[in-house]
Amino acid sequence: MNKLFTKFKLGPITLRNRFIRSAAFENMCTNNTPSQMLEDYHVSVAKGGVGMTTVAYCAVDLSGVSFDGQLYVREEALPGLKKLTDAVHAEGAMASIQLGHCGNMTHIATCHCLPVSASTGFNLYSPTIHRRLKVSEIHNLVKKFGEAVDFCREAGFDCVEIHAGHAYLISQFISPRTNHRHDQYGGCFENRVRFLNEVLDEVMEHAKADKKAGKRALAVIVKTNMTDDCWRGSDMNEGIRIAKEIAKHKVHGIVLSAGTVSASPMTILSGAMPIKALAHYMPGKMWWLKAALLCGGGKVMIPTQKFHELYLMDWAKQFQKAFAEDSEVKDTTLIYVGGVQSGVNCQQIMDEGFELFQLAHVLIKDPEFVHHVEEDIQYHARCGRSNYCIGRMYTLEMKCHECVERDGEVIPKSLKKEIDQLERRWDAKH
């Protein structure tokens, strides 16, 4: 309990405690720029006591944007982000932002170009054809990541999180499932992690302090997959190699996640996806996908994965052991994420030897979660893991169904029934 609320030095910055709000996509931007809603949410989490809150899923370039409610690096976003970071700092928390590129997980109508990836192919998720990046374009995107770090510094952020997992662009290069290249960026492991290494070289260079230029140092953490958990994806053994490759860059932390958004999404989230809610909130132009979801395709495409608290802990401990046995990377800060529901969970993470951890679901439902835990280690948020917040997120802002009803918004009866059914299963076990 004492350690949970002690300070932690993460590279050049110091967190007031061990709680980090993870980069769970909020879908709270207007025309790809920060909204008052986005600021209000992160300020509420900062007020609630986290050591650092993370603004999610900011693309380094327009070609990497998946949603209209998503940020991407451009001058128009600076004033709103500076206002957000100032407000978060005023509450005593640090501010982080996740940087990435969605690769083929988008559509021409959103990214305003033919989606790109490591290799040419067809993505059923969008659905869309996507094309192979040229080597010159890869080099340009590497530079974009570096420029994005400078942008984030100017916006007042203390830390950047590079998204190298979940089958977005960096992961699309790493995974043999999506990388079918035959040049220096494809084939063997060393080639598949080349883009990752080049991005991290660029990021770490731009994140350094430069007193002459008046640049302060930023902390750098990386989210990676322990396993893709899908056919032809990277397995645990390769996941450990990838994490060690990341550590060689002297990043300040590695977030140990897992899963593939287009093949094993519930490995990331755990629990059930509310299919009716997901279909209900989709725009009318996606009628064919709504129909497929409601006619049984949803359960096939997004199968339920049994939820249990700290559901990624066993895998994370394998990474912890592998790092402890390797003198070159043993001092790397490994950050746990996945299934944090209570103060007891938080204490267990500390007891297992992880210095920091990330959490999202409970902070969507209850931004005051950290204060509750500080008052009572037995506090349990009782998030029912119906994942209504995720089903809603793809079209509207991410919001817990309890908060929706508290704020006076009516949830259709059919969706309410689905939520109740899914959450009764959880209640029966707790």
Image: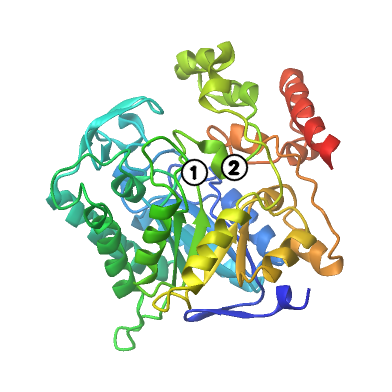
Task: Name the residue: 34% across, 55% down.
Answer: 74
| Quadrant housing residue 117 | top left
Q: Inspect the image, locate mark 2, and give the three-letter code of the amino acid beneath it.
A: Leu
Figure disc tally = 2
Q: Position of residue 281 (x, y in %)?
A: 58, 25
Q: Which residue is mark 1?
A: 259
| Figure check: 331 above or below 103 | below
Residue 346's x, y, as percent?
72, 63
Can I make out residue 85 in this image? no
In percent of width and height, residue 396 lies at: 57, 35
Q: Residues within 10 Å of mark 1 (few under 14, many from 20)?
A: many
Q: Position of residue 6 (x, y in %)?
A: 69, 79
Residue 201 visible in the displayed image: yes
Crowding at dot 2, Cα within 10 Å, few <14 / some 14-19 / many 20+, comes out as many
Q: Which mark is residue 29?
A: none
Which of disc 1 and disc 2 is earlier in sequence? 1
Residue at disc 2, secondary structure? helix
Left or right side of 167 for 376? right
30 is higher (above) or lower (below) than 75:
above
Q: Mark on residue 269?
A: 2
Residue at 26% x, 52% y: name it: 192
User: Closest to the observer: 345 or 216?
Assistant: 345
Residue contact between numbered discs 2 and 1, judged by CB atoms under 8 Å: yes
- Which quadrant does the N terminus fall into? bottom right
